[in-house]
């Protein structure tokens, strides 16, 4: 419980102490949006790294050379833990927005930082609103912002299983022409979700697979793009289990 308490205190402290910083970032954004993107990325990266340090997590990263540095991408990964976001965000080489559930809008200071980081909010119960979020993500990609989505739609609570990867998530790549970058994440739930409410040291493996370009796929793979990407991630996931 000690790590959990310390982590909660750090998060609350960060959200309160950075309230004036948010105002400064807003001013910077009025005159230099690019600088605001980079500074917001650096500030939140710092906060996330402290969070991960508190958990004591050990991370093995494979295939990081597959991450394009000069173009935006659509990151796609399996999802078992809240920490998946922190673990992957601290490694992004350029501004990246995550697609989060709309319930996150309840928390004002957190919501502000997420918007500064180009995050989008998805209402899974509203199909029309969901399509609007996809269109906003496409526009972000066209403006040079990478997007990350977990296409299972929610956290998978069963270890070593995969829920369906929804094809709609991949419209972002199809319509923008950006590459899909699959991420296989092993053992992240061992940090927290496997033994709530305790936080324990864990070894997490993240592998970035080679980018997938939809215009290079055959018709059948395009039609079943969710299944196609899921299989790639599953192959890496089960291969990497021996590293845990």
Image (cartoon, rainbow, N blue to C red):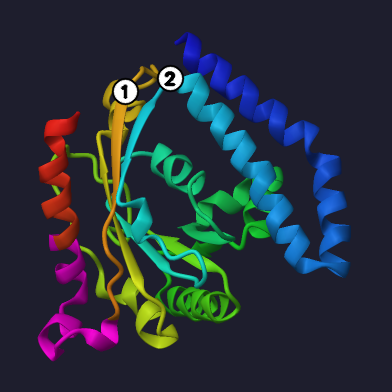
Mark 2 and mark 1 residues within 8 Å of each other at the beta carbon:
yes
60 magenta-colored: no
- Residue drawn at (60%, 53%), measured in percent from left and top? 105
Q: Is residue 82 visible?
A: no
- Residue 185 at x, y = what percent? 28, 44
Taking depth in this image into account, of 225 and 204 the one nearest to the observer is 204
Quadrant holding the N terminus: top left
- Residue 191 at x, y = what percent? 35, 26
Secondary element at tag 2: loop
Classify 242 as above or below 151: above
Q: Which residues are magenta?
A: 214-231
Judged from this view, the residue extending furthest toward the front is: 65
- Residue drawn at (63%, 20%), measured in percent from left and top? 9
- Residue drawn at (25%, 74%), measured in percent from left and top? 167
Quadrant holding the C terminus: top left
User: Mark 1 packing: few (<14 Cα in 10 Å), some, or many (20+)?
Assistant: some
Classify 9 as above or below 135: above
On the rendered structure, is 21 left or right of 120? right
Classify 211 as above or below 191: below
Circle 1 is placed at which residue position? 202
On the rendered structure, is 217 left or right of 82? left
- Residue 163 at x, y = what percent? 18, 55
Circle 2 is placed at which residue position? 56
Label 2 or label 1, whichever comes before in sequence order: 2
Q: CA distance from mark 2 to mark 1?
A: 7 Å
Classify 223 as above or below 111: below
Secondary element at tag 1: loop
- Residue 102 at x, y = what percent? 51, 58
Residue 101, label in figure = none
Q: Quadrant of residue 118?
A: bottom right
All told, the count of numbered labels is 2
């Amino acid at each position: 419980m000690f790590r959990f308490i310390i982590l909660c205190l750090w998060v609350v402290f960060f959200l309160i102490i950075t309230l004036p910083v948010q105002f400064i970032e807003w001013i910077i954004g009025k005159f230099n949006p690019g600088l605001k993107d980079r500074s917001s990325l650096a500030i939140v990266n710092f906060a996330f790294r402290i969070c991960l340090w508190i958990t004591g997590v050990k991370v093995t990263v494979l295939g990081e050379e597959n991450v394009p540095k000069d173009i935006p991408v659509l990151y796609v990964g399996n999802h078992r833990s809240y920490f998946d976001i922190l673990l992957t965000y601290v490694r992004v080489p350029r501004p990246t927005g995550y697609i989060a559930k709309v319930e996150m809008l309840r928390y004002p200071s957190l919501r502000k930082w997420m918007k500064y980081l180009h995050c989008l909010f998805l209402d899974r119960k509203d199909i029309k609103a969901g399509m609007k979020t996809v269109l906003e993500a496409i526009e972000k990609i066209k403006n040079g912002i990478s997007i990350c989505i977990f296409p299972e739609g929610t956290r998978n609570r069963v270890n070593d299983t995969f829920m369906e990867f929804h094809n709609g998530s991949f419209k972002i790549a199809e319509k923008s022409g950006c590459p899909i970058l699959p991420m296989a994440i092993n053992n992240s739930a061992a940090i927290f979700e496997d033994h709530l409410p305790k936080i324990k040291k864990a070894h997490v493996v993240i592998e970035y697979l080679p980018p997938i370009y939809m215009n290079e796929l055959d018709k059948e793979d395009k039609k079943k793009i969710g299944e196609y990407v899921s299989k790639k991630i599953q192959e890496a996931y089960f291969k990497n289990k021996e590293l845990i």
